[in-house]
Amino acid sequence: MSVSDKTLEELAEESREQEKERYVKKCGEFQREIFQATEEVFRELAEASNNFRDVDIDFVRENPITVRILRYLTEPILSRDKFSEYCDVGDQTLRKYEDYEDDTTPQPNTAEKIIGTFEEFRNETLLPWLEVEQMEYHEYDEETLVKKLQTAIAYNIATSEANTEYRNWRATIQHDAINDELFEAGFEKVNVDDVDEIGPGEYVLELSVEGKEADFAIRNRDSDLFLVEAKMSGTEINFHKRRKEMIDDYNDWTDGRPDSEIVAVIGGVIDTDDVERLEEVGITVFWDHELDGLSDFLEA
């Protein structure tokens, strides 16, 4: 069911154009910021380690962010998940070491595992001076190679991580928009662990209902229950997967909680066929660039 006066095609086109403009601007900002920060980190680490010759346990413990650079000096380049798996260090732990603002110090055995994994997968072509110590300096310009590598690694990291930063940022502004709409309509945000603890006019974020997480669980002033999924997508293919997930959640929720009404708040690049499929099964769809009618719908 749709609640907008605009056609589905109009809403989809508006969403697509806004997402394109938003992505180009914001992802570009993230990429520039990450590139500049990574270049600085690379330069400092290279200088402190004699161009990565002296990366040992003590160095990694003193400079845990080194792992952020080492992952991109491997062949193949290892994702954080892969690197943490291969060196038997938890993904969340590795994430802390890669955080520019976190100064967590790895345990000696953890630092040893990180170095061992790097040595096992090290891309020798990127660090030739580690392999050809017998060569005279004039046979290759080490500092020029280091500078080029600094730029290349910073670019690779920025390209990879800017998209992740954008997805997280985009999901946050979508959730914030829903929050703002509910707040302005007089709904109160509460913290409860069970859907039956939500009172009239209250809502909770990220609540497990029938084993599936609802982004928002809301009771209107008549105590009617609404379960909301918020989904954004940068491509039609991606939303096709999200649509399948939402229908699965819809089936689980309506089977276990037949008193609930299911709502989807969507945004980004979306094929109208997928939206029609959502509406056909009984999901009420709102677009995150046009949420004005959400509160009226909840109280209808």
Image (cartoon, rainbow, N blue to C red):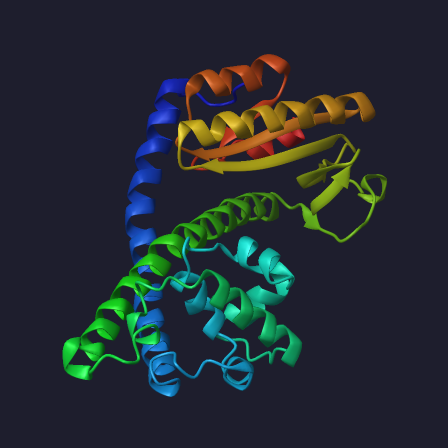
| Residue 241 appears in the picture as rendered | yes
User: On screen, 256 above or below 65?
Assistant: above
Whether residue 132 sits left or right of residue 172 in the image: it is: left
Image coordinates for residue 175, horizontal then vertical, percent:
55, 46
Image coordinates for residue 93, horizontal then vertical, percent:
62, 66
Q: Residue furthest front?
A: 134
For the N terminus, the quadrant is: top right
Foreground residue among 160 and 200: 160
Residue at x 27%, y 68% (from the top left corner): 149
Q: Where, by quadrant of the figure, is residue 139 drawn?
A: bottom left
Image coordinates for residue 189, horizontal then vertical, percent:
69, 51
User: On screen, 128 above or below 171?
Assistant: below
Foreground residue among 200 and 227: 227
Foreground residue among 41 and 82: 82
Residue at x 33%, y 45% (from the top left corner): 22
User: On screen, 171 above or below 263?
Assistant: below
Q: Residue furthest top?
A: 280
Image coordinates for residue 239, horizontal then vertical, percent:
48, 29
Residue at x 59%, y 76% (from the top left corner): 111
Q: Where, by quadrant of the figure, is residue 248 drawn?
A: top right
